[in-house]
Image (tube, rainbow, N blue to C red):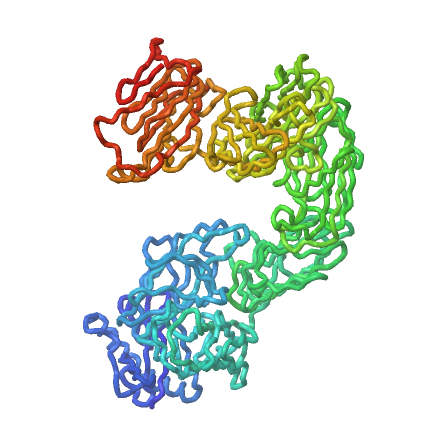
Amino acid sequence: MSKTMEYHYRYSTDKELSVGKNQLTHEESQCTSGVYLFDHKACHLLNNIPKIDESGQRNQMSFVKVTTEEDKKCEKSFTEVVNGMLHLCIVALILTTLQGVVSANIKFRECPKHSTESLSIAILHNGAAGIRSYDWPNSMTLPDGEPRFGNCGFKIKSASNQNVAIFFTSAQFQYHTSLLDGSVNTNNRSNVPTLPVTHRKVHFETRKPQYDVKTHYHWSGFEAIVGAYDNENMCPFESDAVVEVDDSAPRVIASQWYFDDDSATLPQRKCQWTFAPKSGYKLKIAFSVFIINATDESVRLYDDANPVFNLGGAEELPSRVFYTEKNFRIEYDRSARMSDPLSTRFLAVISAFSLDVKPETSEYCTANTTVTLTDDRTLTNYNVTQLLKPYGNSQECNFYVNSVPGKEVQFSVSTVDIEDCCDSLTIETPSATVNFSNPKNDDSNAVYSTVGAEVATIRWKSDGNYGRAGFRIHAEVLDCKCSGEKVINLNKNNSNVYISPSSTLYYCPGMDCQWTLSAPENTILILELNVYLRSQCFSNTNGFGDSLEIFDGTTTYKPQCVFDQPAPRPFYKKNLSINFESSDKRVTNQDENGHFDIKASYVDLVSLRSKNTVRFFNDSADSVLFRTSALVEQFSSVTFTLSKELSSKKLQLYPMSMDASLSFIDNVLIMDGDLSHVASSTSIYDLLYNTTVARPITSTTGSITLVLPYTSSIRHSGAMFLKVYDDSRDCSEANSVFNAPPDGDTFQTTYTAKSQNSKLLVCPLMILSLPGSFGDALNLRINSIQGTDKSVKVLPGTEHNVIPFYEVSRNNLSMFNNTSLYGDLFTILVPVGATIHFSIKMTTVVADRNVAGNTHSMGIFMTPNYPNGDASKQNIAERSLQIISLSSYDSQIDDRFKVKFDINGKLSSASSLDVHVDSKLFFRTANVDSVRLSFVSPYARQVTFRYKGPEGEKGFFVRYEVIPKPGDRPVIGSANDTAPTIAPKPNAAAVLSSAGTVVVIMAMFILVI
């Protein structure tokens, strides 16, 4: 078999192609650029290329024409090339015979600047071409990611309908193709840096990079080699000759051509490449990706015939880059397999740089720099005013950094964008040594710290080519001495102070600080807390053991994170001690850093009187569900106080559980007393979440004052229930008020009725609902009753002598297993000595509700506000309850039922209540001041209650009982069936129309008054 050699034509800047003594025009050069093979023995047909037979060997007896019959204009150019190059054939033979080295430079093209069209390139048969981003090697983008000269695009195809493949030698950019959008980064050690190919061509355009805080200064650009091929019978760019490489054009080798998916078949092959540096150059081979999973495959590297490595079967490279001044030979034994992009694969870039290049230095990167820091500083290897240029070649510099006693220096990476296969950046501290060339250390949140005179060493070295953005390491100096005065007295001349452990943003390990804070008499002291103790807000661990404590003389507060603390925290007439300690443990991540500051101020109670409202309790049944949103202005307040008639009673405040972000809670100050006399104080936050604070608050003064110390754009209203404790009707001062969680969860508990007053027969248990996003009604279920045969009553409001919603005993528990009630407040009367287990949950009652009529059950149908009206709600609401048989009308099973129901309440002139039995109107009432009626419907398959009226009216409730018809009988369908007479109980009021006349329904049923 005859030897072959490659000869590459080079496109010159004056748009002429140099071919011996002949000069081709620009138009002609488009036909001749590419790779041509010469037969060394016969030296014929320069514009022909030997075919490759199935065994992978060249067959010199068979040739194929480079040009096609359709491309007639190229024939003249090829003829001139042949004629002009015949005399060079002998020269080529002599060079090959004597030296065995071929200069194989590949033509590189840059995409044009400010172009709306992608640059088109046609690769000749088995040819290759190089592409680069514009202004290479400078960045295509500005620091904010905007392209400097527009997008950069290429349209690449084969001139002879071969497959094409693209391999990036150095790249970091984002692209768009017809298949997908993606990115290429040659620092990625897992993915081969290539692009998806469609129909034997590749067309891509760059896109604006997506930057984040850590990549703001990244370099963006690319260089790649594109090749044309028929199939995988040969490895990419495989050659028998020694290829000479200089700094003008790199080469690539790879395990295969195709990496997109596993659809290509790779035959078994022994591949070989040999490269030598141009005289005066150093040769470099860098493996972008190297993953050999197949046990029957191996890769071998030789440096001038000396083995460097022989790897296969999941073995790792000893290094990703190797250098020589002699030559490299690479041998690859490939097994027959599919082109799985996630299996065995490798790609290496072969380049060269001059041995005469002097190390590049600047004021930012000199040989050795020693610095003692007292303020923050950024350490870098490039000029921040020249961000578009890559860092210099052959740079080498070292930074030796320390500080002074009482300081800590935290080093964190702002940017690391280097050729991580070949350039080296390390940081060494007494506790850690980190190599940033290893992607495992690519943690932009990592922190490396030194204290005082401890030295951190930063070492940087780049090789002779392929620079990128470089590195920026931020050195932040922390002050480790406790800041501020230790004793702080607030007064008119010093009304606002800030307390913080350090003069810098973050505090240090090993700190121990104390402050004493006081305010004038008869004032409210306000602390606004901005607390982030180390790791508490983000990692939910207490691995550092830092502690902040605020002591007011009776209670210790331990805020750890701003998210679990209210803003602000008020105190009345307090001298506070503030203690802070941090452990000796150092942070290793920026998110672990801690800081806090406390703003302290005060307000005189006398100045609050103009914004104070007083509300009296005049009856033992009086109560208020107060929402803090009613306090609008800062330092507005409301005082609840018992009237003289209730002077022997007690005023109580119960906090209601809330579904809210604690950092925005209305942390209202709760004072036992009015603005002229305060016995004690707490806050709604402590009442809810501090287990050391007693609840409820029972006033010792007969008054409770609520003060809003702070307003903000984001508020979460709190709720408090205030009631009178009267031992003639209440059994206990505590554990008698419960509320349903506003987040939709179910609250369940057990209550035992115990009374200190032997005259009491029942104990009142108050249930509150807090309408919110999870519903506007209360689902109340009594699960069990023990210790009594008496009934438990469920009442609207707080009065004990009103008509109950229902009475439940052990005998009918199952009938009230799903009862929903509207309203804010309900009372359960539990017989003394009884124990009940109950559950409550916020729910939503749909406007039209269905209930099955085949089960004996009881329930409530009611208007939204009974027994309390809300005149502000005037919208008309419509609600219905339909009790319906489950079987169809043609069923022969008599599954009819009757409904007993009581109506209690009143209706306005704009409202009405209709009751239909099957399809006929059974009852109607409207505009009645007071109604108490009882009815029993005839047996039917459907009974419907329908209400229409203003949302805010006091309204009514209907207590109903569904009674299925006993036994199985034929369906009554005769027209002669007579409906029973429906009469109210003797104490029932008349049903009146708006004209004052009796309404009598004379349809199927007769209403007897």
Residue that lies at the very extreme toward the right in this rendered image: 487
Name the quadrant containing residue 333.
Answer: bottom left
- Using the image as rendered, state which of residue 510 and residue 737 is in the foreground: 737
Q: Position of residue 412 (x, y in %)?
A: 63, 54
The image quadrant where one finds the C terminus is top left
Q: How many marks?
A: 0
Residue 12: where, in percent of width, then height?
A: 37, 68
Residue 229, image x, y percentages: 32, 74
Answer left or right for 735 relative to 907. Answer: right
> Residue 947 in the image: x percent, y percent?
37, 24
Which image quadrant is residue 948 in? top left
- Tell which of 426 and 139 is nearer to you: 426
User: Quick check: can you spot residue 942?
Assistant: yes
Vertical placement of 467 versus 780: above or below? below
Residue at 47% across / 34% down in the picture?
Answer: 816
Question: Residue at the location (58% across, 68% down)?
Answer: 358
Of residues 983 and 130, the one nearer the viewer is 983
